[in-house]
Amino acid sequence: MTRPRIVALEPDSPAAVAGLAVGDDIVAIDGESPRDVIAYRLLVDRADPVVEVDRGGLVLDVLVPKSEGAALGAEVHSALFDQVRTCDNHCEFCFIYQLPPGMRKSLYLKDDDYRLSFLYGNFTTLTRFTESDLERVVTEGLSPLHVSIHATDPEVRVEMLRNRRGATSLRWLRALLDHGVAVHGQVVVCPGLNDGAVLDDTLAGVLDRFPELASLCVVPLGVSRFNTEPRMRPHTRDEAAAVVDIVESWQEVFARVLGHRVVFAADEYYLLADRDFPSAETYEGFPMHEDGIGMARTFEQELTGAVDEPTGPQSGFFAWVDGAPAEGYRAPRTSASAPCGATIAAGEGETTAGEGTAVRLSARRDAPVAVLTGPFGAKVLGPLLGTVGRDDVRIVEVANHYFGGNIGVTGLMVGEDVARALADQPMGHRYLLPDVCLSQGRFLDGVAVDDLPRPVEVVPTDGVALREALGLRSPVRAAAGVGS
């Protein structure tokens, strides 16, 4: 087990005033050694905690005067200080098995840890869940959790997870619901395996056995060119349409019996089926927005100014993919040296400032604008940009050669593909890059933003941010008498 290490202190916070320092390893708090950030937060929430730290080999006890519930003001290096509970399923559809070699090591770590489900929204199958885990979840109020269901038929679930415990592990879902824990569910649909009649049976099983489920997302599997499972293939248009029909049929049943729709199909299904997206009201507050449910409608509302605040996080493919990396794709999008939306100066291309120092200059604010996005994003954004009243804004669609297969989400754009798309674009234009494809200023393939052949402006992946980047006045703010 590693010790939590302080990586940042809030100025004038209790931790800073008491003398804690960046780089301190926390040995214990009031004599207890936290195993994860959940335990850490509970311990530092106490009044006047005594923090035992190791400072370069010197062990110190630091009393931190503060009231109960007041923030300590110290950020630690990781969410987990013991080992991540890894996944022992062998799902054919797991995207982690389909990653190319040479990526960041953390992306190959497959977790099945309920703590990361609580902290980041990662999905757990509960096949490694235990009685002591249930006790902790209930005692500490770790809610909501996110559970991969995939099928409620025990035999089908065993086949999908390739784990015999898949037949019985949903008993823990029943136990969680019995104890009042909010749970969001997920079904990754694999054509010929758990679609059609099996999907119907799964949704019937949810209504019968797990009616308290907060929501359930139905998402298509992702298939990269590195897939080695012969049964795993993309949906056809007719198959996608069939999934939408099943989900919408069950929405009516759930609404009639439970008073809310419960189940929602991912935006990708509507794109694959060439169907219009449901109305914003259909999504009932967008409970699974981060999992690709209703993102198109929320983006439309944000861009057109119908709402003035982003609906929620935009984490892209790794938000819901089965077997998501331990910290998902939720690390800071940009590094401290490359803040979102930053521009350096007016002009274009590159110049030099002093001997040996290259300075990249961004385009003028009134230059033509291109929005970089994946194929699915282009289908959503294209029609919307035609409504903003600017004829100098265009889409640059970035084909995903890196992953290949049916991968078209913007969150999986990589530097190699973005650079290829930018190389043919004119100098002097503004290129807007959604931050969803970045983690700490780098793409999944390790390419940094500064390595691209054209300067880009990194903007948050929501319609409000795009509206602001385009200099469009929000009707909501205008009606309130607030400047854009």
Image (cartoon, grey):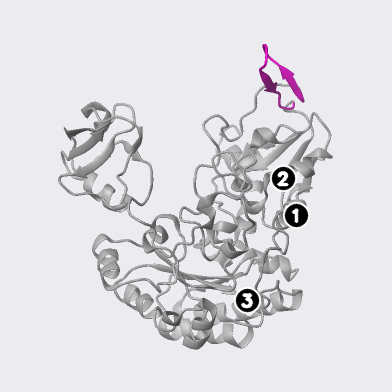
The residue identified by callout 3 is 190
3 vs 2, front mark: 2
How crowded is the residue under tag 3: few (<14 C-alpha within 10 Å), some, or many (20+)? many
Q: Do the residues under discs 1 and 3 have CB atoms within 8 angstroms? A: no
Given the image, on which type of amino acid does mark 3 rest? Cys
Q: Looking at the image, which is closer to me, 72 or 55?
A: 55
Q: In what element is the residue under mark 2? A: helix
How crowded is the residue under tag 1: few (<14 C-alpha within 10 Å), some, or many (20+)? some
Q: Can you tell which mark lies on residue 416?
A: 2
The picture places residue 394, in percent across and down from the top left corner, at 79, 43
- Occupied quadrant, residue 269: bottom right
Q: How many marks?
A: 3
Q: Looking at the image, which is closer to me, 402 or 378?
A: 402
Residue 312 appears in view = no
Q: Do the residues under discs 3 and 2 have CB atoms within 8 angstroms? A: no
Q: Residue at x 53, y 66 (%)?
A: 322
Q: Can you tell which mark lies on residue 156?
A: none
Residue range in magenta is 348-363
